[in-house]
Amino acid sequence: MTQAELSRKLSDMYTRRNNFVHAGTGAFWRDETEELELLEKVVAKLILRITDIDLELDIREGETKWHAWERYVNSIFDNIIFGAEVPSME
């Protein structure tokens, strides 16, 4: 699965969760088993790679690590929505 495909799936899950929790509309899970397994895999891989990713993160002068992470994650969604290039982490 590509980064864009995975991002779309996670965004869809979050949107459905948000609609369920805040608007009371629709069901949260369509195929609970498949989506929960995907989410478990993503979280497990993130936990295993967090140190590597953190070391590669491009932190600009005067920028906090939190803002660098936020900028990188936002760029992933910009890529999905606008087709913009995702900057490398180096």
Image: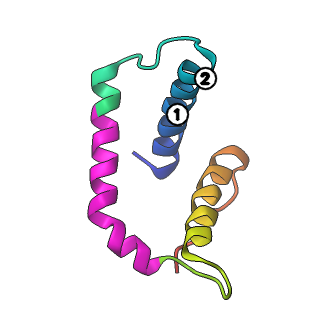
Q: Position of residue 53 (x, y in %)?
A: 40, 71
- In the image, residue 50 sits, relative to residue 27, either above or below, namely below
Magenta region includes residue 42? yes
Q: Position of residue 75 (x, y in %)?
A: 64, 59
Q: At 28% across and 41% down in the image, what residue appears?
A: 40
Outermost residue, right side:
82
Q: 82 or 58: nearer the eye?
A: 58
Q: Label 1's element?
A: helix
Q: How far apart are labels 1 and 2 at the CA level?
A: 12 Å
Q: Which mark is residue 22?
A: 2
- In the image, residue 87 sits, relative to residue 24, either above or below, namely below
Q: Position of residue 90 (x, y in %)?
A: 52, 81
Corner quadrant of residue 87: bottom right
Magenta region includes residue 38? yes
- Badge 2 amino acid: His
Q: At 59% across and 72% down in the image, what residue appears?
A: 68
- Badge 1 amino acid: Tyr
Q: What's the magenta region?
A: 37-56
Q: Earlier in the sequence, mark 1 or mark 2?
A: 1
Residue on which disc 1 sits: 14
Q: 2 or 47: nearer the eye?
A: 47
